[in-house]
């Protein structure tokens, strides 16, 4: 019986080799059954798993604490904020054509369809949407633009322009098509100094949530998620070098401020505070994989 099963397997392999595997059917980004997709535009809605590897808490040196407190808050006007491309501006289409030409077969444009073809898995098709306005409904439009590579792992970036929302970007793996979406038009989004990680932070929709994504390889991976209590405040200061993120925690009254450094080491992430023994009841961090 075992010989028969083994023989059948060999025949199937030879058949696939001889006649070629069927080309996967194209899918929309984030479609059910397609490559994994994580929407980082609304991480405060995530239900985080309770079982997470504990993150070590260590003492933050006093000079580092003073540095964090004196650093200006990170804003949408900060130099490190990820800039979006204006899909509607003159020359946008010409710029896209040049970027697509450099990608060989990985990226194709056909009229309103932008197709990314990873090395494995189904092609991912971004279809422009244009719903005309009528008396009984409001018009709607979504346009996609290939914006080139992003991050150390060279992810494929697709700029998304919404008629009723701020722009954002899909960051797609050229290897298997998995992706994340970041909302750089409204959230704080910044690359680390070495382009190996990206942070996204939104403090307008409680609870304030900070997410760090690894872009070191061709496959994006969520490394760290930190979330404050609904009424607690978090002020983002930004990246400190390539491996640390600085924030300031504020109590519900806003009077008390605690500098915190989230730092990546060879062993994983750790939290540095002026008093390592003091629990961070208003701020909890979980380390991936998520």
Image: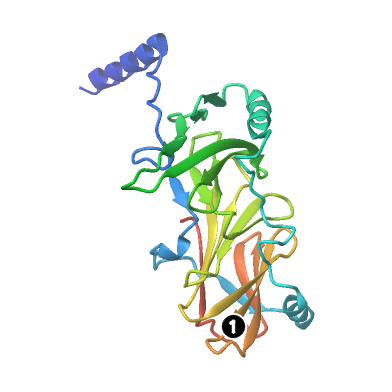
> Compared to 228, does 80 lie above or below?
above
Q: Is residue 54 left or right of residue 95?
A: left
State which quarter of the image contains the N terminus. Answer: top left
Instruction: Name the residue rendered at 79%, 80% in the picture.
Output: 63
Q: Quick one: 205 or 207, which is closer to the camera?
A: 205
Q: Judge by depth and name the residue closer to the eye, 32 or 18.
A: 32
The residue indicated by pointer 1 is 250
Residue 256 image point, x, y percent: 62, 89
Numbered disc 1: secondary structure: strand
For this orientation, the residue located farthest to the top is 18
Quadrant assignment, res 249: bottom right
Q: Position of residue 144 (x, y in %)?
A: 53, 37
Q: How is the image coloured?
A: rainbow
Q: Position of residue 235 (x, y in %)?
A: 62, 74
Q: Residue furthest left?
A: 1
Q: How many marks?
A: 1
Across and down, in percent, residue 269 comes to 60, 64
Q: Residues within 10 Å of mark 1 (few under 14, many from 20)?
A: many
Q: Is residue 63 left or right of residue 121?
A: right
Compared with 244, 140 (above or below) is above
Above or below residue 256? Residue 283 is above
């Amino acid at each position: 019986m075992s010989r028969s099963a083994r023989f059948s397997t060999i025949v199937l392999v030879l058949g696939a080799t001889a006649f070629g595997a069927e080309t996967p059917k194209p899918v929309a980004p984030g479609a059910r059954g397609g490559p994994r997709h994580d929407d980082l535009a609304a991480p405060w809605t995530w239900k985080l798993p309770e079982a997470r590897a504990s993150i070590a808490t260590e003492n933050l040196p006093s000079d580092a604490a003073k540095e964090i407190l004196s650093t200006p808050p990170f804003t949408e006007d900060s130099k490190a904020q990820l800039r979006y491309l204006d899909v509607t501006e003159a020359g946008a289409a010409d710029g896209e054509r040049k970027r697509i030409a450099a990608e060989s077969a990985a990226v194709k444009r056909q009229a309103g369809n932008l197709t990314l073809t990873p090395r494995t898995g189904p092609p991912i098709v971004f279809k422009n949407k244009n719903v005309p306005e009528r008396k009984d409904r409001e018009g709607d439009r979504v346009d996609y633009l290939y914006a080139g590579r992003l991050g150390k792992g060279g992810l494929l970036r697709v700029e998304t322009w919404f008629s009723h929302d701020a722009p954002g970007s899909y960051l797609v793996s050229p290897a298997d098509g998995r992706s994340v979406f970041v909302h750089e038009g409204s959230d704080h989004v910044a690359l680390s100094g070495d382009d190996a990680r990206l942070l996204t932070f939104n403090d307008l929709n409680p609870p304030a949530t900070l997410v760090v994504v690894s872009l070191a390889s061709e496959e994006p991976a969520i490394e760290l998620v930190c979330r404050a209590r609904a009424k607690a405040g978090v002020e983002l200061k930004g990246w400190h070098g390539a491996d640390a993120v600085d924030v300031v925690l504020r109590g519900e009254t806003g009077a008390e401020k605690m500098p915190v450094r989230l730092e990546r080491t060879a062993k994983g992430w750790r939290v540095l505070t002026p008093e390592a023994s003091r629990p961070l009841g208003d701020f909890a961090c979980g380390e991936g994989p998520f």
